[in-house]
Amino acid sequence: MNASKILDQLIRQAGGQSGGARQGAGGMDLKGVLDSLSRQLGGGEGSAQQGSGGLGLDMKSVLGGGALGLLLGSKRGRKLGGKALKYGALAGVGALAWKAWQNTQGSNQVSSIGGEPVERLSGPAREHRSLELLQAMIMAARADGHIDDQERALITEQIDALGADQELHAWVERQLSAPLDARALAARVDSPQAAREMYLVSVAIVDEQNPMERAWLDQLAQALALPKDVADELERLGRDQVAGTS
């Protein structure tokens, strides 16, 4: 499979080629565009395919490139400009997860962060971590129970457009229909750093104000055995990315 290639492209879509929590590909102020569109659409209650009507916009393109937009909340019932769209949390997932851990240590001095950030991995280790994070993103996107068959097809189509090979295509299809099981997802984790990254990408996808999605985060934190202070700090840093702060 080529999961690391797909994850890298999703991360670039989140942060743009030059990085930054508020910019999308080509240096566009992505959050500003989303805020404007949300207002014009009356809160962004269009479907994942919104755009063929009044504004004549392809929402999947505006949302940073198809798959990311669908996963981050262009589904019905989500506000396009709201706090569900934490692009910065995805753009620097490994570093941000490490920072959350560091912030909770206080004056404690420890020799290891418990695994390498995804950005430092290569080869099979990076591929394994990429699969963990992609699976977490897909599960989080499904946590509200609102992905229907058409939306599953759209997500698979957009992942394919990023260059997914046949094996990864089949894997994505399985994830889109597999039971939501936080313990099974957590069982893939191979280090504390991987657990923090998995929780952070889930925070980036969900809307914590949605009870079903909040419940999923709580289940995942428990399954990952994340200390409450670390989980809280990951959520705080994830929310801060919306405002472009750190």
Image (spheres, rainbow, N blue to C red):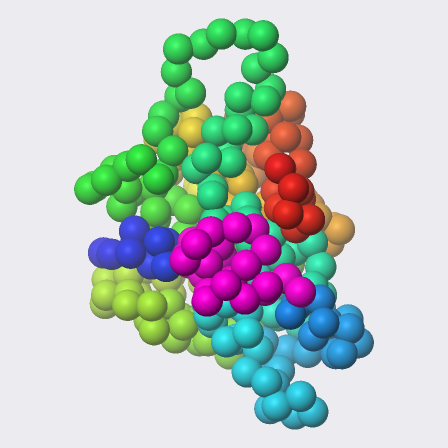
Which residue shows up at 63% across the image and 62% down it? 31
Which residue: 65% across, 42% down?
245
Foreground residue among 210 and 27: 27
> Which quadrant holds residue 218?
top right
Q: In this view, does 150 lie above or below 209?
A: below
Residue 151 is at least partly visible in this image: yes
Q: Name the residue rendered at 35%, 40% in the picture.
A: 119
Q: Which of 168 and 70 is in front in this view?
A: 70
Can residue 196 be seen from the camera position used here?
no
Looking at the rendering, in which quadrant would you find the C terminus? Answer: top right
Q: Is residue 15 magenta?
A: yes
Q: What stretch is highlighted in magenta?
A: 10-32
Which quarter of the rendered picture does the N terminus lie within? bottom left
What percent of the width, then of the height, locates residue 180? Answer: 52, 51
Which residue is rendered at x = 64% and y = 78% of the image?
47
Percent of width and height locating residue 32: 67, 65
Q: In which quarter of the image is residue 146?
A: bottom right
| 134 over 128 or under it: above or below | below
| Rendering coords of residue 121 (x, y %) | 28, 37
Q: In this view, does 12 lie to the left or right of 43?
A: left
Number of numbered discs on residues: 0
